[in-house]
Image (cartoon, helix red, strand yellow):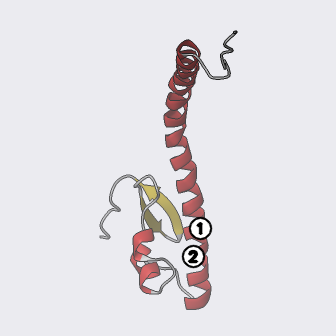
């Protein structure tokens, strides 16, 4: 009497080869993702600065004057309190109606 084996599963060697291929793909892709993270944050900050600039214009239309700083936008509910910095940590400053992102604190008004 002949005994038939069921050979439908993976062998240990085949599983190790699959794991090796997956790990090589991960080793290749992870550095590329982290390399582009800074670029993504920079573009996000640029977009956020444009959004705050639109809020400055809305403030100017409604109040007939430019906001003195970001705090004025927060006080008048044009921005939330936790929205005064870019996603990458740069602070938002308003100088003469122009919005920009700064890595340093804004200079004190003299």
Is residue 17 placed above or below 74 in the rendered structure?
Answer: above
- Name the outermost residue toward the bottom: 63
What residue lies at 51% left-to-right and 41% top-to-bottom? 37
- Residue receiving disc 1: 51
- Name the outermost residue toward the top: 1
Q: Evaluate whether residue 69 shows in this view.
A: no
Q: Residue 35 or 99: which is nearer the viewer?
A: 35
Is residue 16 placed above or below 68 in the rendered structure?
Answer: above
User: Dot 1: few (<14), some (14–19), or many (≥20) neighbours within 10 Å?
Assistant: few
**Quadrant housing the C terminus:** bottom left
Residue 105 horizontal side relative to residue 68, left or right: left
**Quadrant housing the N terminus:** top right
Q: Residue 84 or 36: which is nearer the viewer?
A: 36
What residue lies at 68% left-to-right and 22% top-to-bottom? 8
- Residue receiving disc 2: 55
Q: Position of residue 87 (x, y in %)?
A: 46, 56
Q: At numbered mark 2, what does the secondary structure look like: helix, strand or loop?
A: helix
Q: Residue 37 or 64: which is nearer the viewer?
A: 37
Q: How many marks?
A: 2
Q: Position of residue 102 (x, y in %)?
A: 42, 55
What residue lies at 58% left-to-right and 50% top-to-bottom? 43
Q: At numbered mark 1, what does the secondary structure look like: helix, strand or loop?
A: helix
Q: Position of residue 12 (x, y in %)?
A: 53, 16
Give the spatial CA distance, label 2 vs label 1. 6 Å
Is residue 110 placed above or below 67 in the rendered structure?
Answer: above
Q: Evaluate whether residue 10 shows in this view.
A: yes
Q: Are marks 2 and 1 in contact (CB under 8 Å)?
A: yes
Q: Position of residue 81 (x, y in %)?
A: 40, 75
- Name the outermost residue toward the front: 1
């Amino acid at each position: 009497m002949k005994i038939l084996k069921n050979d439908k599963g993976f062998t240990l060697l085949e599983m190790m080869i699959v794991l090796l291929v997956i790990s090589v793909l991960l080793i290749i892709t992870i550095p590329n993702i982290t390399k582009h993270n800074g670029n993504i944050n920079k573009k996000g900050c640029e977009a956020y600065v444009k959004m705050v600039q639109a809020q400055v214009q809305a403030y100017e239309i409604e109040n007939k004057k430019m906001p003195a700083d970001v705090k004025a936008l927060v006080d008048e509910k044009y921005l939330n309190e936790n929205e005064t910095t870019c996603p990458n940590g740069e602070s938002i400053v308003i100088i003469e109606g122009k919005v920009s992102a700064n890595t340093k604190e804004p200079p004190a008004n003299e």
